[in-house]
Each structure stands twice: as structure tokens, then as C-alpha cells.
Amino acid sequence: MNETIRAVMGWRVQTIGALAAGLWLSLASGTASALMFPLPPEDTNVIGEVQVIAADEEDTLLSLGRRYGIGYEEMRRANPEVDVWLPGEGTQVTIPSRFILPEAAREGIVINLAEMRLYYYPGAESDNAGMVETYPISVGRMDWSTPLGKSQITEKTENPYWFPPESILTERREQGRPLPEAVPPGPDNPLGRHKLRLSIPGGAYLIHGTNEPRGIGMRVTHGCIRMFPEDVESLYERLPSGSSVEIVNQPVKAGWLDDKLLVEVHPILPPEAENAFDNVEPPSIMEAVLAVARVLEQGDVRVDHERLAGAVDAADGLPGTVSRSNSHQIALDEAKLPRLLY
């Protein structure tokens, strides 16, 4: 691994002052917030800050997640010792609102399936030009995976009908819960009030709202991208047809903040998993090594291999530093010095 992870000389990141704090963009419903941050320079890709708040008596991790723009699995992994349904008044709850941008072009929509999160880069003519917005999403189950690659938004529909494909009609019949061939707009329509169709062959893949917001941040869809109703409404009003959409699957992301190298690791479903509710596991250490190697040329640091291995084992989605500090490196060099004298 020492031969694979190595630092090179020649670069130091300068961050912008407002990057760490970020901004909260209130949406029309008043029930949730989209995370919006100043877009950092191309050689910087860490945004936001982790927050710690005190829960109120009526809070759940789901309600707090929706309020702060965080999905179910993100909240659960960041708070493994907190009861999902009854955190308790005064309980300290971590809001994992720091992110490393996915490795993709900073334009249009970028969806990272591994972290179940959507990133939106408004165009130069937008009121939010120079910003990046990010939203929690639900993605496809093992047997209904969401395809990777580049596409476009080809159609926008408000108050859509849902025409279940034959595969879903068959599945529901087998479950004893048959569906009609057309579900009209309303509270029983799983598409919610807004639908964005993608140009993926077959025409069945959508970005849409939901009538069951508790599932946001889980692998529960039939391959579509599901969002909180207020989040998809915000995008629907601003995204024109033809907007680019890139879908990636990056369980390990690496990036820079100041002169520190950070990684963000998300768990994966193992190859032998039979459904989306099977136990997840950390990605391979080699996947983390490759993610780090792709960005090492941008900085002058040495990688702490123990920290990197620990981040992979934890796979909690919280960006953490894996570079050695100068004082750490000096201590290591001094520890080696006596051996060099004999």
C-alpha cells in the first residue's frame, strides 16, 4: 500500500471564507431545507461543516434529517447510539452536513448512488450561480438498480399520472396488492406532485417526489431517484428540459480542504446480497487507495495509512482527515533517527 499511496510536491489549497459555514436555503413549504454552499475552486472539493444540535422532546432522527436536508441512512450512521424514533430531549445529535463533491463535472445534476445524495450546480444565468446545492435521495434496490452514466432531463410533468411498468404490476399481484394500470394524481400516487424524466433508454427512469417521505435516504425505489416533495419542487421550478444529469457510484470520495486530505466513505451492499435490506459492509481498502491516489497530485502531504484504514472500516459517511500533520511527520522522522545512527 505504501507504494500505491504517495504524495507529490507542488500545491496548496486556498479555501474561500464562507465555504465552511455554508448557507441554508429555505424552501416554500417551510418544513425542510436544502443545503447550499459557495462552490469552491476546482482544486478544492470539500463543502459544509458537521453540526451537533440538541434534540427537542418531539424530534426523531427522521424529522431532524428532513429539517436539515439529510437522509435516513446518513442520520442513522452519524448517530449509531441514538434511538431513531426517540432521541430524547437534550440528546446531542450529529448533523452530517459536510461533503466531498463527487468526482464528476460540476454542471447540472450529479447523483452519487453510494451516498444517496444529489448535487445541483446552477448555471451561470441562475440566481444561485457560483453555488452548489445538495439533497438527500432514495435510490434503486438491488433488484431494481439505478443505471449509471450521463443523461438529460427530457420531460417535466406536474401532478403526473403513474403508469406502473409490467414488472411492478406483476410484483404487486404476487404480493396480493394489485395496482391499477394508471394511478391518478393524489395522495396514493408514489410519484408525488412533480416528475422529471431522464433520457436513459426505456424512458422509465425518473427524478420525482413521493407520498412516503420517511423512505428518503434508503434503497427502496424501483430504480428511480426519489426526493422530498419540497426538494423536487424546488428543482422542478428551476431546471429546464435538456439539463444534464450524471449518475455515478462512488462509495469512497477523496478531497482537499486547506492543506489537508480528507476521505468520505459509505458502505456498500456485498455482491452476495439478495435485497436492499441485507447488511452492508465497508468498501475494499483498494477502492479507497485508488480514490486517494487520484487526488494526491493536487497536494503536498503524506497519507496516514492507519487513518485511511480506520475510515474505511467505519464507513460512516463523515469526511475525515487522512493526511499526516507536519508535527506527526517530524515525530515519525525523529523516531527513525536512532536506527539510522547504527
Image (cartoon, rainbow, N blue to C red):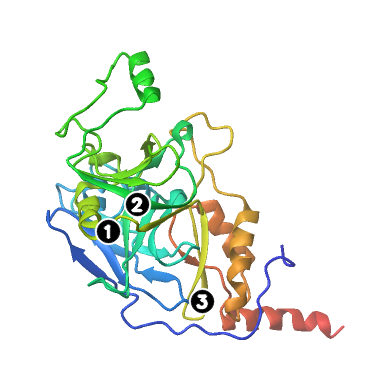
Q: Which residue is mark 2?
A: 153
Whether 308 is drawn above or below 184: the answer is below
Q: Residues within 10 Å of mark 1 (few under 14, many from 20)?
A: some
Query: Of tags 3 and 1, which is closer to the observer?
Result: 1
Rendered residue at 58%/32% (across/down)? 272
User: What secondary structure is marked by label 3?
Assistant: strand
Nearer to the camera, 204 or 42: 204
Q: Which residue is mark 3?
A: 260
Q: Which residue is mark 1?
A: 239
The three-letter code of the residue at mark 1 reads Leu
Nearer to the camera, 284 or 40: 40
First reached walking from the N terminus: tag 3 or tag 2: 2
* Residue 51 in view here: yes
The x, y position of residue 217, in whole percent, is: 34, 46
User: What secondary structure is marked by label 2?
Assistant: strand
The three-letter code of the residue at mark 2 reads Ile
The x, y position of residue 142, in whole percent, is: 48, 34
